[in-house]
Amino acid sequence: MDVTLHLAQDPHADALLGRSPLAALIGMLLDQQIPMEWAFKGPATIADRLRADDLDAGRIAAMDPEEFAGVLSEKPAVHRYPGSMAGRVQQLCQYLVEHYDGDAERVWQDAPSGAALLKRLQELPGFGKQKAQIFLALLGKQLGVRPEGWREAAGAYGEADSFRSVADITGPESLTKVRAHKQEMKAAAKAAKAAGK
């Protein structure tokens, strides 16, 4: 895996996301309750603070939880909730060590179908159905991982020429379109909630 991603909108962070399957998974895990660029910059920040060129699932899984929480809490914090997210990142890494020998790419490497890959992604700690579908769409649209039926398994996020999620962000222009779509969805949800009162 060595592609150019534009999710962090930061060359150093995006380079790591493009070459490291673990960094991409951790970025996706962190992508909640904070701006997307902040989330996807997180893996590079973690690697820098660990004085490593890349992230190692075995190393992170084996770290003392308080020490690892300190890595995420150091200013500027990696996430709005650095303590709880540190725990989630370690759970993800521990799962990868137990089930995939610490090699994140093996999650999708030999997936026989899109449905099977979606199931594997949903089994990862911190990955619900929506997060798994978005990551599956990212794999298919930008990382060339396209097992049979991947678009269907990714649901609406797999649609071609859509601007729904991080899977569709290839630069500043598409980022603006995805942001606009998310605002529309929030406004629609708010209106529906108000109508239901």
Image (cartoon, rainbow, N blue to C red):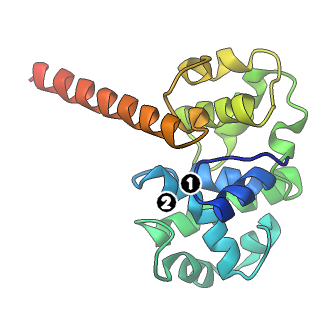
Give residue 18's mark.
Answer: none
- Residue 78 rendering spot, x and y as whole percentages: 51, 69
Which quarter of the picture shows residue 155? Answer: top right
> Left or right of 28: which side holds 74?
left
Tell me if residue 104 can be seen: yes
Task: Give the total of numbered labels.
Answer: 2
Q: Amino acid at mark 2?
A: Trp
Please, what secondary structure does the residue beneath circle 1 have? loop
Give residue 9's mark.
Answer: 1
Q: Is residue 55 above or below residue 49?
A: above
User: Residue at (65%, 81%) from the top-left corner?
Assistant: 49
- Between 26 and 89, the residue placed more toward the observer is 26
Q: Amino acid at mark 1?
A: Gln
Classify 10 Å Cα crowding around label 2: few (below 14), some (14-19), many (20 and above). Answer: many
Which quarter of the picture shows residue 94? Answer: bottom right
User: Residue at (85%, 30%) from the top-left corner?
Assistant: 111
On the image, numbered disc 2 is attached to which residue? 38
- Residue 137 rendering spot, x and y as whole percentages: 65, 29
Q: The C terminus lies in which quarter of the figure?
A: top left
Please, what secondary structure does the residue beneath circle 2 have? helix
Gap between marks 2 and 1, in whole Å?
9 Å
Viewer-nearest of discs 2 and 1 = 1
